[in-house]
Image (cartoon, rainbow, N blue to C red):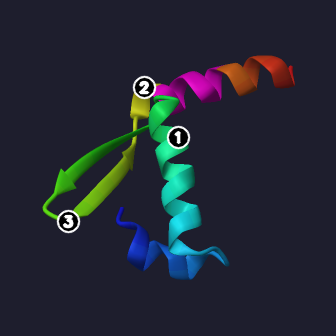
Amino acid sequence: MRVRPERRAFDLSQPTISHHLKVLHEAGLVEREKRGVWVYYRARQDALDGLATLIGSTAS
């Protein structure tokens, strides 16, 4: 996911979305790949699975 196209889906500025993606990356929830001037983000499946397990165990 690139920030520019995705920001239209949210009522947030591009710098705000970039900041939050940086925080998610630092927390280990998303990976990022730089390609030239663009940075592409994607969710880490193992992190999402861990979150699902945690949420499921606390919801019971």
Q: Which residue is mark 1?
A: 24
Depth check, front residue: 58 or 33:
33
Q: From the image, give the main secondary structure of the stretch colored magenta.
A: helix
Identified at 51% across, 72% down, the residue is 14
Q: Disc 2 residue type?
A: Asp
In space, the residues marked 1 and 2 are separated at their CA atoms by 14 Å
Q: Disc 1 residue type?
A: Leu
**What segment carries the magenta color?**
47-53
Identified at 40% across, 78% down, the residue is 5
Q: Secondary structure at mark 3?
A: loop
Q: Which residue is mark 2?
A: 46
37 to 21, vertically: above or below: below
User: Magenta stretch: residue 56 in it?
Assistant: no
Q: Secondary structure at mark 2?
A: helix
| Relative side of 15 to 51, left or right | left
Which is nearer the N-term, disc 1 or disc 2?
1
Q: Which residue is mark 3?
A: 37
Q: Quadrant of residue 54?
A: top right
| Relative side of 18 to 38, left or right | right
Depth check, front residue: 11 or 54:
11
47 to 31, vertically: above or below: above
